[in-house]
Image (cartoon, grey):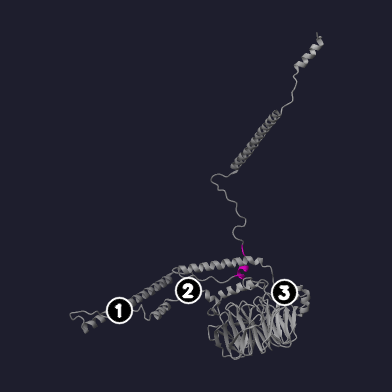
């Protein structure tokens, strides 16, 4: 038998249940239960967060409603601090102004009014856009400025070439060509290519920016003038007898025998016209697009060796030995304008690019500036030796050659000038001057060859890439040539005032009626002559017909008399009305009546 102590020990072991090891499915069930509890707790927290956010939004809405104005007040939208388009300065708009507004025709011509309105809107929009984009032009024109008490005309070309950068300094160079000089020259429209023509037959084409020779020939006879045509692929040479056309490789393309003894030439780029002045006093125009002569005008003024063109309206200016300058158009056989400019013969003429000012030099050693709009002299300067050659730059600088010295003047047209802006002495007598477009370069042809001078501020710093792009490729040049040919201006449109083309020709009723009579051959509004109708039973005898004619004539006469009587009565009524008003005014008392005796 067991003792009492042992029995108590066994009872304690029986009361405590022994813990068995957990199975794998039980562990999985416990993990799933824990995940469910965790999701429930997260869902409760998220619900609480959403509830808090809703409470916040409701409080904010309530706050806005409390702060909102009453029903009578209107809530203004947020206004733009800079409403509308950006303002454009007036001076910049005037810079790009194209034309004045036209006077609109009568209301009946509604189609014409709409066309004019649309044209003016397009012109105004283009003007504003050009004025806005003017800020984006990267280059600015600069002039030469000296130190204190230093004249810019005393600065030599070598000093300028040393002071500027390498690229600009390379633009100053000399070509020693003393064997075939003196030389005439011409720059292409883009300013990239140079054409030289020596008096003794030497002709050369140069890409002067890269110093590459394009072609060089000798025509074996004297050369009077050279001129580029619409592109740098062709140029014209005025030789001893006839006019020749060459390509950029020096191959002769045409020999035009109708143009003989040519002394000077000018090319009109927008009309594709080559104007020539000859020793036989003939001014001739050649259309280079079709190769036909447009006009041949006998000026009857002798040898024509002074010639220039007005770039604004394509009018040709000719200088003569009797001191006159004449203006010509291919549409008229007589001179448009004749101006007496000098007491001696005219030596040179130049017109600025705006067509406003004309500068002339003569044998009387005077340099004169004229306003082409009024044909009146503005300024007159005396040069000790006179000026043989003149040239105006795109920025208004004037170059004048006197013997072997070239002087450049600044602001000649706007203010009096006492000294030159720049001066340079050459090795030989100057025979040709020309400013390079879009470059601060002046080309000088003289007896010892050619010199390229640096003239700061001469060229236009910003070019139009669609018109004259110095950096265009061969493909761009071809496309531009096709477009220019399609937009060619006809010679009939050349006139002194190009703005006349934009005006409406309002013919009077009499002019239209006269044109209609000329077309039809009779006057449709004329009153037909009365012819009595033939009647029977003896009523168409000679006496009866005459009585009817007189009766109709009396009726017409009565109408005329009635109208004249009505006019007289109307005039009498107006006269009486004026007298009545005058009498009424005379009876009124005035404050000055007390001074009458």
* Sooner in the amino-acid sequence: mark 3 or mark 1: 3
Q: Nearer the viewer, residue 74 or 271?
A: 271
Q: Nearer the viewer, mark 3 or mark 1?
A: 3
The part of the image, by quadrant, that contains residue 226 is bottom right
Q: Is residue 359 visible?
A: no
Secondary structure under tag 3 reads loop
Tell me where the magenta segment starts and ends, as one range. Answer: 87-96
Mark 2 vs mark 3, CA separation in Å: 74 Å
* Sooner in the amino-acid sequence: mark 2 or mark 3: 3
Q: How far from the left and from the top, in percent, is residue 8?
A: 79, 12
Q: Which residue is mark 2?
A: 596
Q: Which residue is mark 1?
A: 556
Q: Residues within 10 Å of mark 2 (few under 14, many from 20)?
A: few
Q: How far from the left and from the top, in percent, is residue 19?
A: 75, 22
**Quadrant location of the N terminus?**
top right
Question: Farthest residue in the top direction?
Answer: 1
Q: Nearer the viewer, mark 2 or mark 1?
A: 1
Does the CB distance between marks 3 and 1 fall below 8 Å? no
Figure disc tally:
3
Q: Which residue is mark 3?
A: 143
* Sooner in the amino-acid sequence: mark 2 or mark 1: 1
Q: How far from the left and from the top, in percent, is residue 163?
A: 78, 74
Q: How far from the left and from the top, in percent, is residue 349?
A: 64, 84
Q: In this picture, is 329 found above or below 588?
A: below
Dominant secondary structure of the magenta stretch?
A: helix
Mark 3 vs mark 1, CA separation in Å: 82 Å
The part of the image, by quadrant, that contains residue 543 is bottom left
Give the left or right position of residue 484, taking residue 564 as reference.
right
Q: Is residue 92 magenta?
A: yes
């Amino acid at each position: 038998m067991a003792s009492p102590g042992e029995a108590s020990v066994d009872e304690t072991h029986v009361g405590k249940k022994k813990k068995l090891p957990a199975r794998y499915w039980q562990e999985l069930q416990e993990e799933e239960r824990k995940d469910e509890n965790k999701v429930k707790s997260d869902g409760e927290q998220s619900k609480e967060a959403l509830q808090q956010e809703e409470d916040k939004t409701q409080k904010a809405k309530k706050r806005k409603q409390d702060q909102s104005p009453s029903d009578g007040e209107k809530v203004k939208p947020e206004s733009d601090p800079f409403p509308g388009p950006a303002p454009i300065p007036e001076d910049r708009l005037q810079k790009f102004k194209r034309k004045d507004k036209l006077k609109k025709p009568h209301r009946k011509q509604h189609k014409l009014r709409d066309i004019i309105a649309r044209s003016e809107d397009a012109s105004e929009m283009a003007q504003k856009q050009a004025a806005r984009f003017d800020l984006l032009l990267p280059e600015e024109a600069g002039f030469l400025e000296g130190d204190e008490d230093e004249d810019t005309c005393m600065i030599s070309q070598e000093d300028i070439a040393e002071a500027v950068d390498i690229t600009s300094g390379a633009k100053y160079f000399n070509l020693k060509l003393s064997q075939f000089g003196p030389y005439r020259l011409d720059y292409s429209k883009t300013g990239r290519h140079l054409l030289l023509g020596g008096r003794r037959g030497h002709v050369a084409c140069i890409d002067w920016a890269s110093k590459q020779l394009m072609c060089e020939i000798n025509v074996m006879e004297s050369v009077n003038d050279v001129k580029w045509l619409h592109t740098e692929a062709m140029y014209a040479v005025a030789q001893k007898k006839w006019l020749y056309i060459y390509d950029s490789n020096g191959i002769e393309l045409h020999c035009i025998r109708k143009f003989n003894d040519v002394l000077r030439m000018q090319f009109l780029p927008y009309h594709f016209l080559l104007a020539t002045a000859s020793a036989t006093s003939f001014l001739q125009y050649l259309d280079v697009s079709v190769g036909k002569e447009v006009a041949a005008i006998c000026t009857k003024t002798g040898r024509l060796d002074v010639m220039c063109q007005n770039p604004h309206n394509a009018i040709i200016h000719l200088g003569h030995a009797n001191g006159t300058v004449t203006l010509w158009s291919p549409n008229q056989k007589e001179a448009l304008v004749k101006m007496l400019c000098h007491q001696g013969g005219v030596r040179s003429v130049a017109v600025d690019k705006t067509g406003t000012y004309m500068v002339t030099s003569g044998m009387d050693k005077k340099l004169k500036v004229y306003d082409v709009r009024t044909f009146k002299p503005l300024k007159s300067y005396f040069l000790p030796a006179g000026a043989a050659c003149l040239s105006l730059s795109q920025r208004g600088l004037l170059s004048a050659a006197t013997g072997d010295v070239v002087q450049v003047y600044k602001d000649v047209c706007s203010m009096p000038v006492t000294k030159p802006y720049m001066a340079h002495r050459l090795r030989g007598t100057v025979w040709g001057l020309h400013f390079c477009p879009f470059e601060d370069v002046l080309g000088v042809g003289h007896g010892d060859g050619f010199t390229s001078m640096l003239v700061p501020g001469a060229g236009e710093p910003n070019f139009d890439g669609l018109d004259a792009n110095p950096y265009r490729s061969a493909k761009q040049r071809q496309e531009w040539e096709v477009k220019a040919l399609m937009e060619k201006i006809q010679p009939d449109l050349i006139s002194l005032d190009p703005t006349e083309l934009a005006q409406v020709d309002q013919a009077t009723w009499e002019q239209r009626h006269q044109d209609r009579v000329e077309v039809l051959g009779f006057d449709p509004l004329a009153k037909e002559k009365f012819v009595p109708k033939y009647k029977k039973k003896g009523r168409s005898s000679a006496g009866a017909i005459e009585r009817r004619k007189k009766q109709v004539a009396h009726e017409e006469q009565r109408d005329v008399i009635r109208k004249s009587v009505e006019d007289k009565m109307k005039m009498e009524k107006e006269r009486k009305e004026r007298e009545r008003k005058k009498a009424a005014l005379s009876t009124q008392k005035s404050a000055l009546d007390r001074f009458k005796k």
